Image: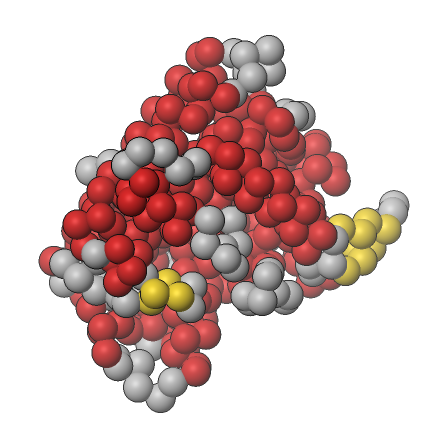
Amino acid sequence: MVLSMVMSCSPSLCLPRSRMVMQKTIRCSSSVSTASESIKFDLKTYWTTLIHDINQKLDEAVPVKYPNQIYEAMRYSVLAKGAKRSPPIMCVAACELFGGNRLSAFPTACALEMVHAASLIHDDLPCMDDDTTRRGLPANHTVYGVDMAILAGDALFPLGFQHIVSHTPSDLVPEDRVLRVITEIARAVGSTGMAAGQFLDLEGGPNAVDFVQEKKYGEMGECSAVCGALLAGASDEEIQHMRKYGRAVGVLYQVTDDILEAKKTEDKTEGKKKKGKSYVSIYGVEKAVKVAEDLRAQAKRELDGLEKYGDKVMPLYSFVDYAADRGFSIDGQV
């Protein structure tokens, strides 16, 4: 479970001395000084450039066909304005880290966004988290109805798999890697992954919070990082680093969201949010902040084993700090 893993060690004790120095100096869009060179990585530019490319490819991947209503509902969520595209960005960054071409990652990146959008559509339904808004806009079911929202989500899941198979360049990615990517996504969204997390979010007791956070949010980050590594032909050991890294970042992102939301309102149990199991709702803000700090350290620690790739690790490294600090906005969203 996430809490038992991250609470067992603190950033100051777990990080190697060299990485501790980097943790204090590396920040998104800032200079980083090391013993031998000065590195500058602009995560915001990297991210926004990829968002433009991914949005264009998603627009092409989900055209309006008959029956129009289903496709319009699908596009409403997949192409939502202000979407930060975190899963596809992580997939592309992981692929490039291990020497892959981003063109080989785009079909899987788009599929991950389709799967992500489908999960959000279903999570928002009245029978699930019962949320009427998403990204500041009406949730899919409030616009198209519950029946159409269910169908849109159901259609997006298989469309993602189809898109990977039909659009991944065979000259860049061998067939066996494509099969491993599909298997990884199926595992992440299935009965032992995100679906299990959603079930326990609805039915489990307070002690289920670790499992809920890891499965409902960590699985998407884990899957995104692992898929990028698989496409590039990373070794089994490297894939394990990406698995643990992505899981930690996925949970960190959500814990930070919950902390920021709690600080914006005095009533932390207001409205429908009381149904969800978060570290803030179960343990309070102070302990949630500690969890976030340990998750940040854990994610960076997984990158220590990839130092041989040099500067290529910087997008993933900087992504950890963004997940924790939200140092800049993407299309108006922090």
Q: Residue furthest left?
A: 203
User: For residue 36, which quarter of the picture?
Assistant: top right
The residue at the point 38 percent across, 85 percent down is: 265
**Is 98 in front, or is 51?**
51
In the displayed structure image, the side of residue 81 where residue 201 appears, left or right: left
Image location of residue 94, percent across then percent down? 58, 35
**Is 120 in front, or is 37?**
120
The residue at the point 74 percent across, 40 percent down is: 311
The residue at the point 21 percent across, 56 percent down is: 145
Q: Is residue 304 above or below residue 44?
A: above
Image location of residue 318, percent across then percent down? 64, 53
Q: Is residue 153 above or below residue 268?
A: above
User: For residue 8, which quarter of the picture?
Assistant: bottom left
Give the colour scheme shown.
Answer: secondary structure
Q: Is residue 10 visible?
A: no
Image location of residue 92, percent across then percent down? 58, 36
Image location of residue 206, percent across then percent down? 18, 65
Image quarter (top left, top right, bottom left or bottom right) of the C terminus: bottom right
**Is 153 in front, or is 273?**
153
In the displayed structure image, the side of residue 74 where residue 321 appears, left or right: right
Q: Is residue 37 visible?
A: yes
Q: Number of labelled discs? A: 0
In the displayed structure image, the side of residue 40 where residue 228 appears, left or right: left
In the displayed structure image, the side of residue 156 where residue 317 appears, left or right: right
**Is 188 in front, or is 286?**
188
The residue at the point 68 percent across, 55 percent down is: 44
Q: Residue furthest bottom?
A: 266
User: For residue 262, which quarter of the picture?
Assistant: bottom left
